Amino acid sequence: WKRALDIVGASFGLLLLSPVMIAIALLVKFTSPGPVIFRQKRMGQGGRPFDFFKFRSMIPNAERLKKELRAKNELSGPVFKIKNDPRITPIGRILRKTSLDELPQFWNVLRGDMSLVGPRPPTLDEVPQYELWQRRRLDVTPGITCIWQVSGRSKIGFIDWVRMDIRYARNRTLTNDLRLLAKTIPAVLAKDGAY
């Protein structure tokens, strides 16, 4: 049921949102130098790396500047986030606040690297810093939305975030996935914890 829901949902999302995605691509292209799509290696189910897609919301050399900004990290654990990140472009700030930068991940879902619902995929440098129990979030296919995504996102500390992911992994049902998908739209519109 999960793969069927992913294929139908991602296909419908791409079809319905294709005009929006074209408009975003043009905005990104004409407002800052660099590629339209940001591609990054992320850790998938079982620790398998995959190419993760987003609309680019940062300046082209953002990954290199991350080391210089590490001391300003506002989240606990191995994850990195700064509310007023100087690497984010003006258009990128809007895309991130509205979660529109995530739309290319429908392609990840169609490819089978991601699911509509599941733990957010970590970057490759985060996972070596996990405690053993935290690696259990890699037991399932990562997703576009999850409990963390609809519960306040960046307001939630890393330990609670991982606990939410493990709770989801233990209780994967069609009803739970549909409930989380239904909660995602109001959570995105509220922009709670998004930056």
Image (cartoon, rainbow, N blue to C red):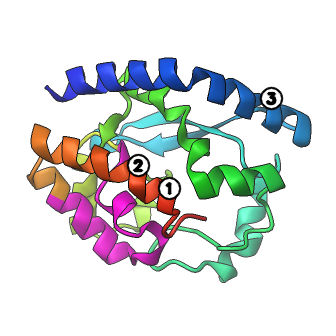
For label 1, the residue is 189
For label 2, the residue is 185
Q: Is residue 7 left or right of residue 139?
A: right
Q: Is residue 128 left or right of residue 57?
A: left
Kind of residue at disc 3: Leu
The reply to whether discs 1 and 3 touch (Cβ–Cβ < 8 Å) is no
For label 3, the residue is 26
Q: Using the image as rendered, state which of residue 189 and residue 171 is in the foreground.
A: 189
Q: Which residues are magenta?
A: 143-167
Give the quarter of the figure containing the C terminus. Answer: bottom right
Per the image, is 172 magenta? no
Residue 57 % position (x, y): 72, 48
The reply to whether residue 105 is in sight is yes
The reply to whether discs 1 and 2 touch (Cβ–Cβ < 8 Å) is yes
Q: Residue at x 50, y 70 (%)?
A: 193
**Sequence-wise first label, 2 or 3:** 3
Residue 129 % position (x, y): 42, 68
User: Which element is circle 2 on?
Assistant: helix
Q: Using the image as rendered, state which of residue 18 and residue 113 is in the foreground.
A: 18
Q: Number of labelled discs?
A: 3
